[in-house]
Amino acid sequence: MIKNICCIGAGYVGGPTMAVIAKQCPEIKVTVVDVNQQRINAWNDADLNNLPVYEPGLADIVQEARGRNLFFSTEVDQAIDQADMIFISVNTPTKTYGIGKGKAADLKYIELCARQIARVAKTDKIIVEKSTLPVRTASAIRDILDNTGNKVKFQILSNPEFLAEGTAISDLLNPDRVLIGGNPETEEGQAAINVLTEIYARWVPENRILTTNVWSSELSKLTANAFLAQRVSSINAMSEICEKTGADIDEVAQAIGLDSRIGSKFLKASVGFGGSCFQKDILNLVYIASSYGLDQVADYWEQVIIMNDYQKSRFANNIITTLYNTISGKKIAFLGWAFKKDTNDTRESAAIYVADYLLNEQAELAVYDPKVSEQQVLTDLNYLNTRSEQENVNLISFNSCPYENCKDAHAIAVLTEWDEFKTYDWQRIYDNMLKPAFVFDGRNILNEKELTKIGFKYQGIGK
Ligand code: NAD
Ligand code: UGA
């Protein structure tokens, strides 16, 4: 019986996942630890608006469980020591140095966790890989844990997370499936699988809890993300054909989505997918394939990224050519900066790359996003290192009022599909813009007919 769970990593996965486990299992003490003091402080902030992760429904769950059986702390050693089960939910970014630079997953944080667990643990523990990892990572973790010489026994499970940001809480409460990879051949291995299954079985129907071998579980996570991203790149590839032929991508998506073999989800053409995982996980898959000499397989998946990069630059290019081939000194108002709606996460957001492209042409950007701060936008652009921090400050303005943000703009670019954009008073926005007033709808969320009637020059994706 599990009494104490520790989760290493209090990020977008560790925080919401553990909050839901704590909510559903009030008698289990769940401690989420992180080396980032600021993040832990934010998780402990009395004002729930200051939680480091914005997700609909999250604040209510944190309010219910925090201090009861959900704790956030920087005392990593202590939490490891007390836990029967340890989730590793640290970041696994793309390597920026050395062998595999730009493709392979950087596993240094995972290894640090394994070494810390090995050093601190005095009692047997179940280690759960929650982070997304290259297939066969569990064997490296096992090597580290088995060589501590302190006779502690570890069971290692893979339990990848499939939540999507913006819908994390409903995904966690009602998942399509929970995947548990383990070693049922040994008695202890089977027991570990059973223990984790019992936790999820409190609220997930048993037929949605799938057990596989560890390697299948690790690889299934990369495969799921690769398939999802591939659908977005596929529909985006078709969007350009639509623009050349008079077909409409939303109509095409609807027509093919009604085929039950294809399905209707994930067929929304866009300015390009973003987020911390799709690109990183596909690059990781490409690297794994290459390292086994499977060059055709690697090229096949890399094309999904190439198409996505092309979609972002195509969107930016279209703005420039439509605005009479020069945007120098012109104000372009961005609506949205997050990589999708209902999240404050901006990692790999298409907005960053489109902005960089337009800034290279000396545009002046005005950015509004309901959940993203001015500082975050500047941090994202500074990270690219394309121009000095001061230049970024000079070229970008912010306004917490969307109407002010769009005032005197030559064009509006919709980068995120926030619902509120649909219900704005577009006549008011039009009246305060320079004419001709352009709208580039990178998410196809606005009402083209209505906007055109007002007088806007509207362009969607694949229209
Ligand atoms: P994140 O960057 O938001 O959070 C990771 C946290 O781990 C950070 O706060 C960092 O300080 C902490 N950390 C790193 N090393 C540590 C250590 N040694 N000790 C203690 N804390 C440490 O990342 P995330 O978005 O939560 O993603 C975590 C993993 O989950 C990644 O592998 C990712 O691919 C995967 N994943 C993410 C999502 C998502 O929607 N973000 C969904 C499914 C899976
Ligand atoms: C994705 C997966 O959906 C999750 O199952 C997975 O757990 C997660 O990655 C992960 O491993 O990190 P997430 O990136 O949070 O989740 O969000 P998605 O809804 O998948 O959207 C990703 C990007 O694709 C967004 O920029 C979104 O706007 C874009 N997208 C999505 C489209 O452009 N069109 C679509 O039809 C769907």
Image: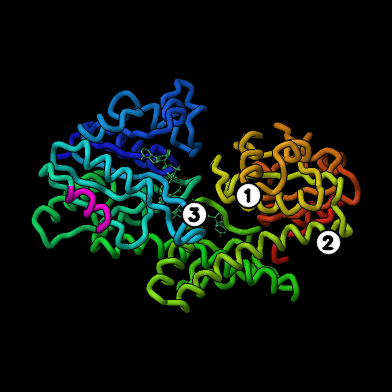
Q: Nearer the viewer, residue 76 or 304?
A: 76
Please give left or right for residue 88 compared with residue 343 in the image.
left
Image quadrant containing the N terminus:
top left
Q: Quadrant of residue 292?
A: bottom left
The magenta region covers 139-147
Please give left or right for residue 433 compared with residue 147 in the image.
right
Q: Which mark is residue 461?
A: none
Q: Is residue 144 magenta?
A: yes
Q: Nearer the viewer, mark 2 or mark 1?
A: 2
Any part of residue 419 in sight: no
Q: Amino acid at mark 1?
A: Glu
Residue corresponding to mark 1:
417
Q: In the image as oriented, which residue stretches furthest toward the right? A: 435
Looking at the image, tell me whether mark 1 or mark 3 is earlier in sequence order. Answer: 3
Any part of residue 236 in sight: yes
Residue corresponding to mark 2:
321
- Type of secondary structure dominating the magenta stretch: helix
